[in-house]
Image (tube, rainbow, N blue to C red):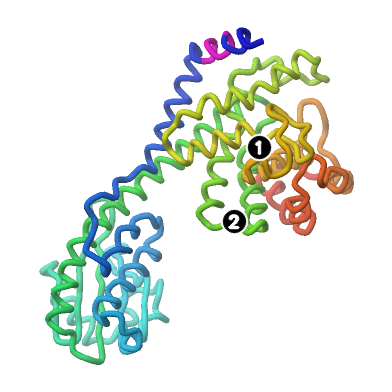
């Protein structure tokens, strides 16, 4: 048996399609690998090195403002109430406020010149032409931009004077800010590429089998909803949602005539299908990237069962990673609720009956409870992604 498996693995590695997809997956992981070295301005600047991990300008702006306030107030949170300001980003030759504090908080997502006082407009216009940061008695205005991003303005005004020491710290912060914004732009640009790559990988998987139309996207959405109900943190949910989309990557090694067979599989054919879990794991297990390692675990474990009768390892209960348990339920729910080459979609009542029966047998009981409590949300996801209706 071991020799047979080794021969199969060698066949996999000879397969040009496998090599192309594996390279793409590992390239995908590279997009998340950013160098954090060389960013340190002691405690005041410590959290700034994580700013670029946010993929939205709102979050970036929020971090920037909070860091500036911590510098200006030097830890005296009471003085933060004396501050007002905003971050504005260029939009079609105008500036839109992406984040505001104090009196400017109500103007978020509005055009700058439509809402700010005339004297502030004049101050900004006068100095923006120079593109240089300004440090006044009780006001500061910083500019930051990048070739792959937009021009941006940070404006803060205080009810008290901003001291020379604080201004010196802000100048240090400004140097770091430009570096962090450049990384944010690179990350966002990479994520645009990543979205296309994920879509391409999904299409490769879906094209392999007639029954896979929209399957990986639905499973990703179901997994996200289950993870939210389970109480996983935001980063884990995001990782699961992306990694789950390639849970069936191992099916690329299975012959089309088996995947698309309209009738019942023979025992030998079913054993061939079962190989996809280990095959997917083998494709990704050597990656150094957390995201791809997560995808490898999901690929390996999404056919394990709560009672230990699943495959390939017969893991029981929480010996299976929570991501594997989530995708296991999401995968089966999608198989039941949509048409496949070997069956029509089940009616909702029959699906619910099976979920109740398999609670604590096939599936994690807590996850089944989450799905049953939100069953119509799952049906809505199914209907949105598919033309098939129960």
Q: What residue does disc 2 label? A: 232
Q: What residue does disc 1 label? A: 215
Q: Quadrant of residue 229?
A: bottom right
Residue at image coords 40%, 59% = 56
Q: Which residues are magenta?
A: 7-12
**Label 1 crowd (10 A; few <14 / some 14-19 / many >=20):** many
Q: Is residue 278 above or below residue 128?
A: above
Residue 355 on the magenta segment: no
Image spot of residue 336 (x, y percent): 79, 38
Locate the N terminus by quadrant: top right
**SS class of the residue under badge 2?**
loop
Q: Is residue 352 above or below residue 2?
A: below
In the rendered view, does 107 fall on the left or right side of 44?
A: right
Image spot of residue 219 (x, y percent): 65, 42
Relative depth, front residue between 66 and 102: 66
1 or 2: mark nearer the eye: 2
In whole angstroms, how far apart are the C-alphas of marks 1 and 2? 23 Å
Residue 9 on the magenta segment: yes
**Taken as a whole, is the magenta stretch helix, strand or loop?**
helix
Relative depth, front residue between 42 and 119: 42
């Amino acid at each position: 048996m071991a020799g047979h498996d080794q021969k199969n693995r060698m066949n996999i590695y000879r397969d040009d399609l496998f090599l192309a997809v594996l390279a793409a997956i590992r390239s995908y992981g590279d997009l998340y690998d950013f160098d954090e070295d060389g960013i340190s301005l002691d405690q005041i600047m410590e959290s700034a090195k994580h700013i670029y991990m946010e993929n939205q300008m709102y979050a970036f702006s929020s971090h920037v403002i909070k860091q500036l306030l911590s510098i200006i107030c030097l830890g005296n949170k009471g003085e933060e109430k004396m501050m007002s300001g905003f971050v504005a980003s260029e939009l079609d030759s105008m500036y839109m406020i992406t984040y505001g504090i104090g009196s400017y908080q109500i103007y978020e997502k509005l055009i700058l010149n439509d809402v700010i006082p005339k004297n502030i407009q004049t101050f900004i216009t006068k100095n923006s032409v120079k593109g240089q940061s300004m440090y006044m008695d009780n006001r500061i205005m910083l500019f930051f931009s990048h070739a792959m991003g937009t021009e941006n303005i940070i404006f803060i005004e205080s009810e008290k004077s901003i001291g020379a020491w604080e201004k010196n710290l802000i100048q240090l912060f400004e140097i770091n800010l430009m570096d962090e914004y450049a990384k944010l732009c690179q990350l966002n640009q990479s994520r645009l590429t990543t979205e296309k790559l994920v879509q391409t990988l999904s299409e490769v998987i879906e094209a392999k089998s007639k029954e896979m139309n929209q399957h990986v996207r639905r499973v990703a959405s179901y997994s996200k909803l289950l993870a939210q109900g389970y109480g996983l943190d935001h980063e884990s949910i995001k990782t699961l949602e992306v990694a789950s989309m390639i849970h069936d990557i191992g099916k690329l090694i299975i012959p089309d005539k088996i995947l698309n067979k309209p009738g019942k599989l023979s025992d030998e054919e079913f054993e061939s299908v079962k190989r996809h879990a280990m095959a997917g794991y083998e494709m990704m297990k050597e990656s150094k990237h957390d995201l791809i390692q997560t995808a490898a675990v999901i690929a390996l474990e999404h056919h394990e069962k709560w009672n230990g009768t699943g495959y390939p390892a017969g893991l029981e209960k929480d010996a299976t990673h929570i991501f594997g348990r989530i995708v296991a339920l999401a995968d089966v729910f999608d198989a039941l609720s949509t048409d496949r080459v070997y069956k029509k979609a089940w009616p909702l009542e029959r699906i619910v009956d099976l979920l109740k029966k398999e609670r604590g047998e096939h599936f994690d009981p807590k996850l089944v409870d989450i799905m049953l409590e939100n069953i119509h949300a799952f049906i809505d996801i199914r209907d949105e992604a598919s033309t098939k209706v129960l």
